[in-house]
Image (cartoon, coloured by chain):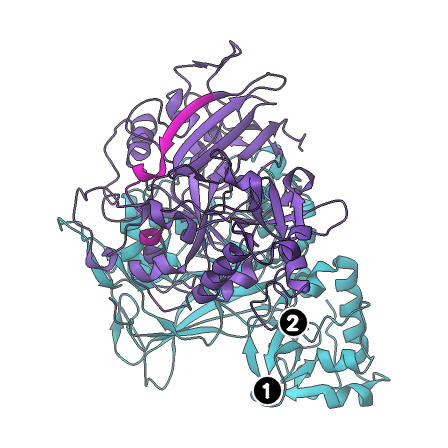
Chain colours: A cyan, B purple
Amino acid sequence: MTRLTSWVESANSADTDFPLNNLPYGVFSTNRLEARCGVAIGDMVLDMAALEEAGIVTIGDDPVFDVPYWNDVMEMGSDTWASLRARLIELLITDAPEQAKVAPHLVPLSEAELHLPIAVSEYTDFYAGMQHAKNMGAILRGSPDLPANWLHIPVGYNGRASSVVVSGTEINRPNGQRKAPDAEMPSFGPSTRLDIELEMGAIVGTGTPMGHPITVDEADALIFGYVLLNDWSARDIQGWEYQPLGPFQGKAFGTTISPWIVTAAALDPFRTPTPPREKQLLPYLDSTVDGLYDIELTVSMQPEGAVAATTITKTNYNRMYYSAAEQLCHHAVGGCGMNPGDLLGSGTISGPVAGEYGSLMEISWAGRDPFTLTTGETRTFIEDGDTLTLSGHAQGDGFRIGFGDCAGKIVPAVEFP
Amino acid sequence: MTRLTSWVESANSADTDFPLNNLPYGVFSTNRLEARCGVAIGDMVLDMAALEEAGIVTIGDDPVFDVPYWNDVMEMGSDTWASLRARLIELLITDAPEQAKVAPHLVPLSEAELHLPIAVSEYTDFYAGMQHAKNMGAILRGSPDLPANWLHIPVGYNGRASSVVVSGTEINRPNGQRKAPDAEMPSFGPSTRLDIELEMGAIVGTGTPMGHPITVDEADALIFGYVLLNDWSARDIQGWEYQPLGPFQGKAFGTTISPWIVTAAALDPFRTPTPPREKQLLPYLDSTVDGLYDIELTVSMQPEGAVAATTITKTNYNRMYYSAAEQLCHHAVGGCGMNPGDLLGSGTISGPVAGEYGSLMEISWAGRDPFTLTTGETRTFIEDGDTLTLSGHAQGDGFRIGFGDCAGKIVPAVEFP
């Protein structure tokens, strides 16, 4: 893929997350601007509502950018997505004729407060990382054997959309029920096994009506873009509650996403195939597209007051067994209607070896093997004051398509009852 | 509770679902009126948008009834709910001074098309019927023993809001993956074990912010009202997919609710306590309110072309172990934010004896014991063309608080891929 250069000089740095090739979509406010749609370019954000009001970008009969979500744009469909991206490149590329008209509508990112980029319709979380599934089986059920359905179904469950928050939002340690294996009765209180899950989130851009299944290729075309996603998990609460109906309150106290939707168009040059199938999938899951992406991912942990964060995981989204398009196809196959703004968590991304694990449950092997931070402190699970940060980018030749941080700090549990 | 009489004569019949004591809230349209809020009274529906436009009912600065959902009214809070109900009684009671002004805004129910009464924010389904849990354990896991957590946690899982439809909506038999116990590989196709679940749905009227747990008593006060709810279930798909993360596509092809929200205020005289606790609940689940209601429930089945429906179940909502308020408290206790329009399914309501079971899985004991309809046909699960109808009411002295039917007809699966 050709590297594009911009008259916004900071976008031409090799290590910016937001070169002209990226153009991710977010929602921002400043102390004089209400929350509205914006596009990141270098260290600036382009005020889309202002561009629209000035008549520089127009994509519909009614204004669509002066709102705190991209859902209206997503609903307009993929032709609109393509023409919007083309128009933005035209406006921001080096020597753009309209540079002087656009420049006044750039706001320094340092002055912008970032918000959720979409109104989350519903949130579904999948379980598509094979190493993670094997590790969790070994830890929770005593065997690394995959569940019987795992090689046939992109296993998933419905999560809680109201708990999805943008990077930077503090998360209260949840209270909940848990029972130690040797205890006779459960108890109630703050989780003592608080964890992350390193995931990607796929954002459904256009929906499907109820009763209308779609192929994997069709599903791929409905995906607007991707974010980083941290599916915070309280392992003690989850372990006690999840039989027989799955995770509930152990996953409902917070799910953090990165603030910028990196579009499928920007990621297109970095597509990679899913790995060879260990068992042939049923024909409804056939596809002709490479549904994964080569996205390098890291997780870091920084205790309160520590001068630096410690990288605790490095892995890649290309490790997954199922793509988001396969997951979306399976999601809709029984007739479930999908809507713009539906968020699909990939499942925890763990590579095949230690150092590539995407949860503390795996890194500390359920708390048995503490790990050491650069500060000298040790951890098994998260302590109050710890900040966990997910980062990721696809590496091009001289540029990268970055996501911006997906960070959250854990603060003490609220007192209850 | 005193029976109230109305100048709308049909509301004074002992067997109407909608006497003046009820006043349930729905959304209707006619061939000349767009979908809007309405209130059922006898065999009529009161056009709330018209009453508001005429200045007869005003509850806020902006119009709230000329929209196809009650969410705006719900968000206004319980004082508004109470004053609205008082105003409606004042307008509709026998010898009401404003009768002549109100009468022109009554529309015959026979001319009204009914829609979902709320915009469903999120849908959560619980598992609070003890007999159902024991039956399902016996059928699915070989033991009627309750799951270890069941007597401590109002067990629930997140469902799919986009699949919630109003009574009368046809439901396609879902396609999906299933695997017979003796098969080596799963197959894909129409479900062959299609079932109902007889439930009540509680509608959250006012929300709670993220990170703010609530007591059971506080939760009770947030519930706006109740509907009948049929959580259609594909047992073959569910059985293959549900380990380890719970039900997903086996429950995502349709959830039917009755069209009228029967308010907590109307049901208040019919409150009943939860049954004695077999194990003491943790203190966060303590309450001072009687959270269940004495609501008689029936399910009928009618094959295509049959002259009459056959009643296949009679039971009562007072059979449940956990109340909706307990479920809502548990839902929010870890910090999960709740929103107006959240729908909480009670879980399948099965009484302690055969004849009171709320699913075909239990009635036919997983298909082993076919039952006979009045037409002479037999059934184990649902066949194409069958209509399943849930009905329910609380019985007062000379009146009843009814819900209207919660009906759905199963039509053939769509061809896919």
Callout 2: SS: strand
> What's the residue at 83%, 79% (across, down)?
A55
Q: Which sits in the foreground, A290 or B389?
A: B389
What's the distance in space between the residues labelled 2 and 1, CA to CA? Answer: 16 Å
**Residue type, label 2:** Tyr
- Residue at 49% from the left image edge and 25% from the top image edge: B300
Q: Which mark is residue A30?
A: 1
Relative to B309, residue B204 above or below: below
Q: Which mark is residue A25?
A: 2
The amino acid on which the numbered mark 1 sits, given as a three-letter code, is Thr
Question: Considering the numbered disc 1 on the image, is that residue within a helix, a strand or a loop?
Answer: loop
Report x, y in % for residue A211.
64, 38
Q: Position of residue A58 (x, y in %)?
A: 81, 73
Residue B264, given in percent of the width and then of the height, sits at 41, 52
Quadrant placement of the C terminus of chain A: bottom left
Is residue A110 in the magenta section?
Answer: no
Of label 2 and label 1, which has the lower sequence position?
2
Residue A306, x across and y down, in percent: 33, 84
Say whether residue B319 is magenta. Answer: yes
Check the residue under mark 2 and report the chain it is in. Answer: A
Question: Which chain letter goes with mark 1?
Answer: A
Q: What residue span does the magenta drawing correspond to?
A: B311-327
Q: Quadrant of the N terminus of chain A?
A: bottom right
- Classify residue A8 as left or right of residue A322: right
Front position among marks 2 and 1 = 1
Question: A283 or A35, which lies in front?
Answer: A35
Label 1 packing within 10 angstroms: few (<14), some (14-19), many (20+): some
Q: Residues within 10 Å of mark 2 (few under 14, many from 20)?
A: many
Asked whether the viewer can see residue A408, the reply is yes
Q: Is residue B285 left or right of residue A144?
A: left
Residue A403 sits in quarter: bottom right
Q: Is residue A337 visible?
A: no
